[in-house]
Each structure stands twice: as structure tokens, then as C-alpha cells.
Amino acid sequence: MDYRNHLKSGALLGVVAIDRLYEGNLANLTQLGLLGLGSFALGLSLGSGLPDIDHHKSLIAQKLKAIGWMISRFFSHRGFTHSIAFVISVYICFMFGEKYVPSEYNLAYRYFAFGTVFGSSAHILMDMFIGNGVRLFAPISQRKFSFLRIRSGSKAEATFHKFLLFLFVLYLIFRTSLGGELLSLLGSISLLAN
């Protein structure tokens, strides 16, 4: 699965997660503000590609050449960076980094961290559907876990992404008050921007 597909699926799952975290009322997102929402989106963008840093041809490994080269030398693709231990490691790094963040940016930092960890988790989940699976418990176990073995880049993968989008639309439909909440949120954001 390429970065664009990981980003799309991460964004769909991210909207559902934020909706659930804000108790099914997206209008509550105005408490988060533009900085927090933007921080979450940036973190989600980073996290959606982060596990693929172990593959030298991935977008993130190309952008962070030295780090990507080093990680791809030590870890096989869909190994440690596609495991629960990796997600926990990313979370711990953010926890330690928080003490160096000025207090006025703590909330934005936390949303960035949450977005990154969530995006990485969504990436790993999606890779369990596409390809040969992931080593979810690496480095303890090398056993691969997968739900489906859809070939990456195939028509079946495109169909899978359409199915995810369909499920997302169904989610929005069953959230009957979501349309009004989105309009309220957009109105609140435009007021915050002015």
C-alpha cells in the first residue's frame, strides 16, 4: 500500500476516532481550536507513513534519507516498525519530548503525538489487510498476522479502499446529526480564523 492510500485510510479512521473522542459531537472540536486540529492532522500525516521508514523506497525514507537508510539496514520491511512495540516506542518518545515543549504548546503537542501514534497504528492495521501481513509482536515473535492477503497495487486493493470509503459514508449517514455539527464546526472555525 502506498503512502497516499495509507493517508486516506488514516484520515477516515482519524475522523471517526476524533468523533468518538468528542462524544459524537464534532461541534465540541471548537474547544480544540485550529492549532490542536492542525496538530492532529499533521501528526496523522506523519504517522500514516512512519512505519514504512524501514523500506528505502518509501516516501518517508526518501525524505529522511540518513535515518531511512539506517533503519532499513537494521530492520526488515514490515518487521519491527510494523509492530505494537514500535507504536509504544513512538508514544514513549513523545512522552519524554513533552517536557521540552513550552507550556502554551502542550495541548497542540499532545494532539500531534496522538495523531502520529494513531496514524502509525492505522498504517499497521491497513497493512494487515494488504500484502503478506505484519510482524505484530516483533521483535519477540516473527509470526506474521494478516486478515486478508490483498496484493498491493491490485484491483482488489482499489476495491478494498472503495469499500472502506463506503463504510465511512455509512458511518456518516448513521450519525444523523453530523451534517449540522460539521456546519457548526465550520462556522466556529471561520470565527476563530477572523
Image: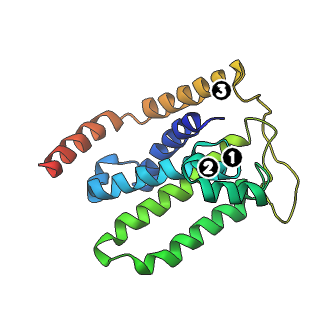
Q: Nearer the viewer, residue 12 or 24?
A: 12
Question: Circles 1 and 2: CB distance less than 8 Å?
Answer: yes
Give the label on residue 160, or none: 3
Question: Which residue is at a point 29% across and 48% down the rendered structure image?
Answer: 27
Specify whether 75 is left or right of 111.
Answer: right
Q: Residues within 10 Å of mark 2 (few under 14, many from 20)?
A: many
| Quarter in which the N terminus is drawn | top right
Question: Circles 1 and 3: CB distance less than 8 Å?
Answer: no
Q: CA distance from mark 1 to mark 2?
A: 5 Å
Where disc 1 sits, the SS reads loop
Which residue lies under the disc numbered 1? 56
Place of residue 150 in the rendered image (x, y in percent of width and height, measured from the top left):
76, 29
* Residue farthest bottom in this picture: 99
Question: Which residue is at a point 58% across and 30% down the rendered structure image?
Answer: 164
Which residue lies under the disc numbered 2? 61
Where disc 3 sits, the SS reads helix
Q: Residues within 10 Å of mark 1 (few under 14, many from 20)?
A: many
Q: Residues within 10 Å of mark 3 (few under 14, many from 20)?
A: some
**Vertical placement of 86 versus 124: above or below?**
below
Specify whether 190 is left or right of 38.
Answer: left
Q: Nearer the viewer, residue 106 or 187?
A: 106
Q: Considering only order in the chain, which callout, 2 or 1, is on the residue closer to the N terminus?
A: 1
Q: Considering only order in the chain, which callout, 3 or 1, is on the residue closer to the N terminus?
A: 1
* Residue farthest left in this picture: 194
Question: Which residue is at a point 48% across and 55% down the rendered structure image?
Answer: 115
Query: What is the three-letter code of the residue carrying label 2?
Result: Ala
Image quadrant where residue 88 sits: bottom right
